[in-house]
Amino acid sequence: MKKSIFLTLFVAVSICFLGFGADARAANPALPITLQAYGNSYTVTKYEVKKDEEGKTMIVLIGTGWPIVPMRNGNLVIPISCSLIANGQKFDNTSFRPSQTKAEYFFDTSAQPEALIISPNDNPEKKVTINLK
């Protein structure tokens, strides 16, 4: 009898857990996220929300491809755009700093983001939204 109750409880908890896990995964895309921009691949394996020296919000996308910054019409272009949603308002990045393994995006707000929107700059319809709440 105890085994039967335990098994029933275990199955019920497992179903609830799997169901909640599926909902959470549907709300956010699984990492890594790979985006194609200007013929190159950019992969995000992790992201961080930080504050810069002035206390403004900064997003760090960690992964591969970031040292490749293409040129168009004689100008360097940001391959992957990053925006944030904070207090119901969309903020586009004001500056960008790539390195070997990450890209840092700086914003003109100190608000805590509710979501991130990343997309290839040459194909913005392919955007990916990451909910942070």
Image (cartoon, grey):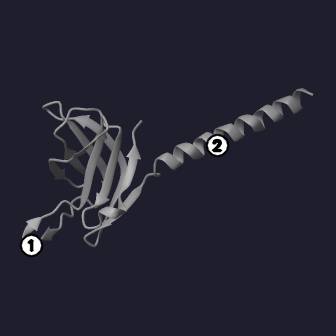
Q: Is residue 77 above or below residue 60?
A: below
**Residue ID for mark 2:** 19
Front residue (pair 116, 2): 116
Residue found farthest to the left:
74
**Residue ID for mark 1:** 73
Q: Is residue 4 above or below residue 81?
A: above
Name the residue rendered at 16%, 50% in the picture: 97
Q: Is residue 105 above or below residue 71?
A: above
Say which element carries label 1.
Answer: loop
Name which quarter of the figure residue 41 lies in.
Answer: bottom left
Q: Amino acid at mark 2?
A: Gly
Front residue (pair 90, 95): 90
Answer whether residue 65 is visible to the viewer in this image. Answer: yes
Name the residue rendered at 20%, 53% in the picture: 99
N-term mark: 1 or 2 = 2
**In x, y percent, where is residue 43?**
35, 58
Q: Amino acid at mark 1?
A: Asn
**In x, y percent, where is residue 74?**
6, 70
Name the residue rendered at 30%, 49% in the picture: 61
**In x, y percent, where is residue 32?**
42, 54
Residue found farthest to the front:
88
**In x, y percent, where is residue 53?**
14, 32
Contact (Cβ within 8 Å) of mark 1 with mark 2? no
How many residues crowd mark 1 within 10 Å: few (<14), some (14–19), many (20+)? few
